[in-house]
Structure formats: structure tokens, C-alpha cells
Image (cartoon, helix red, strand yellow):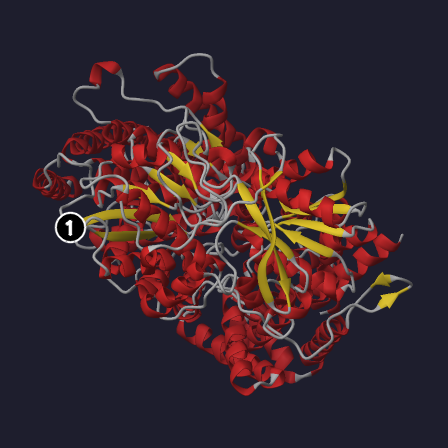
Amino acid sequence: MSQRSRSVPAVLAVAALAAAGLSACSTPEASPGVTDDTITVGTHTPLTGPAAAGYSSISAATKAYFDYVNDNGGINGRSIEYVVKDDGYNPATTQTVVRELVQEDEVFAVLNGLGTPTHSSVVDYLNENEVPDLFVASGSPKWDQPGTYPWTFAYNASYIVEAKALATYAQETWPGKTYCVLGQDDDFGTDFTTGLITVLGADGLASTQTYSVSVQDVVAQIGAMQAAGCEVNFLATVNGFTALALGTAAKMKYQAQWVSSSSGGDYPTLVGYLGEDVAPLLLQGFVSSNYLPFSPDDEWVALFREINDEYNGGAPFSGNTVFGMSVGFLFAQALAKAGDDPTRESVLDALEVGALTGNGIVPLSFSKDSHAAFEGVGITAVDQGVQDYVGDVFTTDGGDGDVVPYTGEPVALEGDGIPTA
Amino acid sequence: MNRRQRLPGQRPLVRTLALAAGWTAVALLGTFALDPFRNYQLALVAAYLCATAGLTVLVGATGQLSLGHAALMAVGGYGYALTSNALPFEGAARFVVALLAGAAASAVVGLLLGLAAARLSGPYLAGLTLAVVVALPAVASTWSTVLHGDQGVQTDFEGVPDALRRIIALEQWQAMVAVVVAAVVVTGLALLRGGRFGLRMQAVRDDEVAARLSGIPAGRVKVLAFAASSVAAGLGGAVLCFVAQAVSPGAYTLGFSLLLVVAVVIGGLGSILGAALGSAVIVLLPWLIGRLTAGLPTDAAQRLDGNLAVLVFGLLLITVMALAPQGLHGALASRRRRRPPDTPRQIDEPAPQKVLVPTEEQR
Amino acid sequence: MDRLVFLLGTGLARGAVLALFALALVLIWRGARVINFAQGAMAVVSTYVAFEVTSLTGSYWLGLLAALVSGALLGFAVERGVMRFASPRSPLSGVILAIGLVMVLQSTLGIVFGPDYRPVRVPFDDSAVLVGGVPLLSPYDLFVLVTAVVVMVVLAVLFRWTSLGLQMRAAAFAPEVSRLLGVRVSRTVTIGWVLSSVVGSLAALLLVPTSLGLNPHATDSLFVLGFTVAVVGGLDSPVGALVGGVVVGVAMSLVTGYLGAGLVPLAVLALLVLVLLLRPAGLFAAAAARHA
């Protein structure tokens, strides 16, 4: 059979090449991805496909921050290389690109992998292979399981924490109103609703509506909320659907107080969806939560704006930019605290002894028993087209613990935003 | 039987088995030469091959185009994952039982879809199967107590058996298992197509009325062909779940379903070898392009990253369909002295255009 | 009761766009006996053209005109450049070529414009008019409905009473015979593609302002729904497309309102399966064929 006789040498040739490739890369003694002057980390994030909108700015911002650090001497003399892989928000692709990062690019750690379904598909793999899985970009409570996933650390405040804080704020600010929720039909919506019910009680929500990302139409849901007489509407929506919900309500001449999770509450991004003309009107009084510096006069924001202009080509500055750069800062800090010759273990130790401050408005919770980053959020509101903190900050846990006002100061900026040991 | 004249696509049993054993042996030996990531890619190729081989036989032998094979893979994956999680025992037995459950689940769904498919012609079937893939996330979230919405179902990990642990790495083991399952699937499909059932499928494809007149139960043949193709896809999905330890609706998108069609078309419709080549292309090309764009500035790399691969696949699909409908396999075959028996022909074949809508012409 | 009225109104507005898009599929089916799986991707390209023209000139109407013109050009280019290669004997080759086209167009848009949604504005008041306290259709919804009906009427006239329309129908049903009778079949097929692409572009342009915004994948679900509508109404029947659009639009609205948004794709699938199995020629095919 001619096809066999022709193919066998080809297969052998491929095999020989592969074997040569294998022997060429010897096993380093230090942790993978670390050389004398570089450290390589990677991420998976959606850059293309239907779910990519809005997310690509995060990894670009992180990269810009690392470029800034590298131009200023790096961390302990090492520059940070950031390998960004597109997974199209497809868990199967995430599996492939994360293996590629770990096995081909030999990254030191996976940083800020984005998305609950996508990252769920690699969290076992990363922990089996003892690859640090740092600062996952998702509010699922799943990442905070030090027993099951010792190498995984969360970043976002969990949906439950956010919901409990927002519900507490709503009860204090608008007592006795009719509360309702519109949530995405996945764990984002269900976790957030769970958090709301923890505070508001089992019958605290007059209407619970859901939407599916595949149907870009929420007229029926908003109509139901209007019919149920909802006055304070919580949103567990991504930015696009927050915009759609508010726009739809405006078309129906339905006035309500909107209270959104941070995942769908970024003012600049919402303006992108709604248009600059109508956004300030629709979003007047819009309440959301956040845990990162976002006040217009904040020193972190000023620094990040400078970095964005210089290293990110002046891309639109949004909550995602702050998010991406803050993740970069936190990783740089972890690296700085992990010693002159960082290993995967030493980074883990630095995180678990609580050596990191981050740059949030509440302290980080990392410890041996907690891999949650932020167990608290501040409340923001939009006034005259400016989104800013209103002053209320709450801390709580992901269970049914109390929601406690927090009065400490946010983390101050030190040393030009380049962490040192 | 041995005096029977062989039609295109017919091959004696012994030769089919020998060919299958030879290729499997080459692939299994090949795993020793590959690093873990290459072995992971090989496992993907093998899993995709299950689905593309099923699809190519379906399109080639019956002329039914399914855009929903990703959904059928998902059914196999869910069948595997749910069974594996429910079984009280572990090891090889759990793997085999779960795999069979995946096959059974996809057989049931394939039969149901096949019943619809048997009554529909080309574009209608394509549209229906498209709607099936699009509805998959809704299925997962509607029955989320069992299917866990878009998080999907995670399974325990099936490690390398103790006896082999010293010489075989995990990825290599997964690649070997995937290769063996793919070999069984492909051999089964080749035997099915090479036997009496294959003749019936071709008869129905070429002229359904004539086939009915000759006593061939055309409807049943089409349903069974669809179900067989579905089982192949389901086994592919089960293998993917075995490799990835997870199955979720986001992994089986319309985009992935179209990619399976790309693999089948550029390999050459109807050719199993072509399906293997096509599966390798859809695994390796995005990876290669990712490597090429890695050096570009952030903005350009971000825009090109996934899009460029899709662009190339689209161009390949159009070019192959327009200029060389026999695909890679056809290109290989044309260099041989005589036309090999399994060269696909159906695309030039006067496939009767069976339009369900009564037209003036038929009245 | 208010709720039902509200949901019916919403469904009607959505249904009009679906009907228009389904009409584009029907046109191409009548003109060339193919289902254009690239209809959505082609329409989204025209919508990007409209978006760019509107941002440059500030005029919605110039953008709309540009979308129609680019839709026509695209229809012409696709028919001459790609679909000509479809094997006349195999219905599959046209489907596969169209799928290739979808991949090329969407990825090119992704490379040029990136994945972000762009808001599309309309020069209409899009807040709903309250009737008895129930928000019903907005002026924009009415514009969509009227546009859909006008397009339907124009096309019905074209097909029923003009020589070109008759030639197109003849060429699609019996190309060989038509050729013998002096119909320039290749020209009528091209015209069918151009018309269909223009109508599809119009549908996408009308839909996008009511959704998240413009994105390379903005018409993915429009295609699936439009296909369902076309099948429900009967691929041969423009009237069927109109009625099918309203049926599917209202059904979606009712399912979302009473059962939940997550069930919509399942309801669409169920409707498609039911119609295909029980009445494969669509609800209106028989009547339309009798009239034809």
C-alpha cells in the first residue's frame, strides 16, 4: 500500500525531530520560567469570538504595567515577560493554551486566567502540576479552596461578597423598597442572588429574572420587573447586559434604582455601549461596587493613566485598565517578596504569610487558610458622568457571616508603583 | 460474497484490519517520541478524528451534512462524565463503562436526530443541526442540576496504570488511549462502509427512489447511518472528556462544529485518511499561527490571534471546495497510478436534489 | 392581561426584523435554490459599512443608503466570486462555500474592527408609547414594521407582475428550460443574490440598534432565528416569511416572559423540529405554490 510506505518515513522523521527537540531543552533546576534576568508568566483570556468584547483590554493593561516595571529595572533585576494566549472563552481552547503555556513556554505561573467556565477547565491541571495559578479573574468562590487547590489564588471579590455588601447598602439607603434582581443564567447570577438572599431574607426579592447571553433582548425581563413594582433592581449582569437592561428600561419609561455587581458596573465601558450622549443621563445615580482604586483624583489612577498613555498607546482608560494593572502590581509585589531567587514555592509562601498589600481599598485576605483576595468592597455611584466611591466600604465573608463596615484607609501608593522587597 | 464486484469504498475485511493495526501501531510507537504537549495534541487529533471520521462517512456515503457534530460530541462527553462520576469503582473498568455510556448516549440522540434527518435534505438538515448546536448551552443551563450549566461536569482523573507508570508519562498515556479508541472507531466505520450497509448507503445517496424500488429501506439506512456517525462523534467527545477531565457547553460551540466540517472538507469528503489529515490540520494550524503572531506588538497580536486561524480555515474551505473538492486526500491520490477505491466522488456525483418543498416542477 | 399585551407588542417588533431577514433567505432560495448560510455574516459587513459612513458623515440615512449599496455589491461579489464555484449537482457544496465565507468575513471584521460592541444610534425616539399604562411599540419599532411591510410589498410586486420577477422564478425552478426560452439564467441568479443581500443587510441594520451593538458576531443568532422563520413559513413563500417572523417573534417573547430567557433557544429548536417533521414544506408553502 503506497500510502503506508510513504507515510512511515514521514512519521519517523517527525518522531526524530520531536526527540531532538526534547533533548535540546534540559530540565532546569530552578522553577521553570525563571532565568537570571527574566521571569515568564502567562495568561489565558478571550481576545476573539462572541464573548471577547471588553476583555482584551485587561491583558493589554497588565502587559503595559509590566513594560513599565521592566523599563524601571524590573523586580530584583528580572524583567517580567507576559505571554497572552487567546482562548475565545472556550474551555477546550483554554485547556490547550494553558498546556502550551506550561509545557512549551514553560511559564513560571499562570496569572489572571479569565472566566469561570474557562478557568474551571484548567484548575485541576495546574494544581496537579503544581503551577502557581495566581489571581484568577472571576468572582466564583471556587478559587478560594486552599485544601483542594493549594496553588490557586483568587483575585476578584466573590459574587457573594459583592451581593451581601450591595444588599446591606441598599437596605440602609432605601429601606422598605421593593427589591428585585436580574441575573445571568449561570453561577454568576445564582451566586450573586444567594448573597442577596443572605442579607435580604428568603422573601426579600419581589422578582428574580434571568437572562441568557445568547439572547440579546431583555425587554420581557425588564417588563416583568416593572409589572412587579420593583424599585431597587440588583444586576448580576456583564457590562453589555447592564447597558441593555438600562437602555431597555429607559425605552419603557421605567424608572428604578439600579445596583450592579462590579462585573457589570464599569462606567467607561457602559458609556462605550450606551454612547456618550445618553450614558450620563441613563447612568445618573447608578450604584455599583468596586475594590480597586477608581476615584478620579486617586494617586493610583493617576499613575495608571500615565502608564496607559506611555505603554498602552493611550487605549481607552476603563475599570479594566485599572484591573489589569492592579493584577500586574500584585504579581510584581508577590515576586518582590519571594526572594532574590524566586521559586514557585517561595511565591506561594509569600502569599500565604500575608506579606502582600495589593492596591485595593480593603486589605488582601491571603493567608494559609484563605485564598480569597478581597473579602470586602466599596460602594460607588455615578453623579454627573463621574463614577466615584460614596464612602461606604463593607467587609464580609463568602458564607452567612455578618456584613461589617470597614473604616481603614485604602493602600497608599509607594515608590512609583514598583514594589520592592 | 468474495465473488462480489467491489464498488467504490469497498475493501476486503482483512486488508482493512491490517491497515488499521498498522496505523495504530505507528501512532502508538510515535507517542514515545513526542514530548507531553505533542502527545496532548496527538490525543486531540485522535479525539477529533473519531468525530470527523464519523462525519466524513456520513457526508460521503449518504450525502447528509451535519453541522451539529460538536453537539453530538458533547453528548458523548456528558455521557462519559456523568457515568464516570456515578460509578462506584475505579480504573480501567470505570473508563470502559463510562466510554460505552458515552457511546450509548450519543447513539440515542443520534437516532432521534437521524429520524428527523432521514426526512430532510441537505440544507434543511444543515440548518436543523445548526440549531441543535446553538441550543446546547440552553440545554446545559435548563437542566443545570445534572449538567451544571456552563460550568459543565468535571470528572475524576484516570491516571496511568501502576504497571506502566515508570515508563509512560500522563500525556503519553492519554494519547495512547485516545489513539486506540480512534482506531476502533475508524475501523468500525471502515467496516460499516465497506460491507453490505455501505452499498445500501451509496444506493440511497445516488438515487433514493431506485434504492427503494430495489427493496432497500432507505429511511432506515439513513437513520442508522446518522446514528453510527453520532456514536463515532460521541466516542470522540468521551475521549476528549477523558483527556480534559471536563465537559462543558462552551467547548462545543458552533465555531467548533464548523471546524469539524473544515477538517472533513479539506481532507476530502468521504475519505477517512482525509479526515485524519484534516483533524491534524485543525489542531496544528491555530497553534502554528499562535506561534507566528506571538512576536507582534500587543494590539496587532490581539487582533490577529484567533481571527487569523479562522480566516485561513475559511479561505481553505472555499479554495478546496471551489478548486479541489477531493481535498488533501484527493491531491495525494491523484499522484497515484490508478484511482484508489475509496476516492470520494459524491461531490461530482449526480446526487439528486431532494427538495422537500413541492415545486412546480414536481406538480 | 397587560403583560400579555406588552409581550405581544414586543414580539411583533422583533418578529418584523426576523421576517425581513427570513425574506432574504427566501429570495435566494427562490432565485438560486440554495440556503445562504453566509447571509448573516454578509449583512454584518454592510452594517459595519453603515456604521462607518454614519460616523463620518453624521447622517443615519447616508449610512443606511451605504448599507444597501454595499449589500448589493457584496451580493454581486459573493455570487460571482464564490458561489459560482458551487457544484450545481450537490446542494452541499453551496452550504460549505457559504460556511467558508462566514469564517472569512467574521474573522476579517474581527481583525479590522476588534471584538468590542459599538453602539448604533437611530434618529428615532426609541422609547415606547404607553397605551393604557402598558408600554407598547416605540416609533422606532413602527419604523421597522413599516419598512418590513414596504419591502414585502415591493418584492411581491416585483415577483408577481414584472417580467424580471417572472424570469427569476422560472430560472430558479427550471434553469435549462428557461435558458432555452431565452432567459439569461446567470443574470437572474445574480440579481437574486443582489436583492437578497440588500434585504438581509437592511434587516441587520434594523436589528443592531435594539441589541448590544455592532460586533462581528452580531447576526449569529439572527441567522438561526431567520432560518427558523423561513422554514416555519416555507422557504418558497414571502408571505410565509412575514407570518413566520411574527409567529417566532411572539413565541420568543412569550417564552421569555412566562418561562424564562434560557428556554428560548430550546423553544426555537422545538418549533423547528416540529415544523420540519409535521409540515416540512412550511405553513404557507402549499398556498403559495398554488398561487404561483
Observer-nearest of A370 and B264: A370
Q: In the visual, does B151 lie left or right of A179?
A: left
Q: Splitting the image into 4 quarters, where does residue A394 fall?
A: top right
The residue that appears at 20% across and 43% down in the rendered structure is A33
Q: Which residue corresponds to mark 1?
A: A37
Residue B89, x across and y down, in percent: 42, 12
Give, as a three-letter code, the residue at label 1.
Asp
The residue that appears at 35% across and 36% down in the rendered structure is A351
Disc 1: CA contacts within 10 A as few (<14), some (14-19) or many (>=20): few
Question: Disc 1 sits on a residue from what chain?
Answer: A
Residue A67's place in the image compared with A14, above or below, is below
Residue B104's place in the image compared with A115, above or below, is above
Observer-nearest of A207 and A166: A166
The residue that appears at 40% across and 31% down in the rendered structure is A367
Observer-nearest of B83 and C34: B83
Q: In the visual, does C29 lie left or right of B184?
A: right
Q: Splitting the image into 4 quarters, where does residue A368 fall?
A: top left
Q: Splitting the image into 4 quarters, where does residue A208 fall?
A: top right
Residue C36's place in the image compared with B192, above or below, is below
Q: In the visual, does B9 lie left or right of C51?
A: left
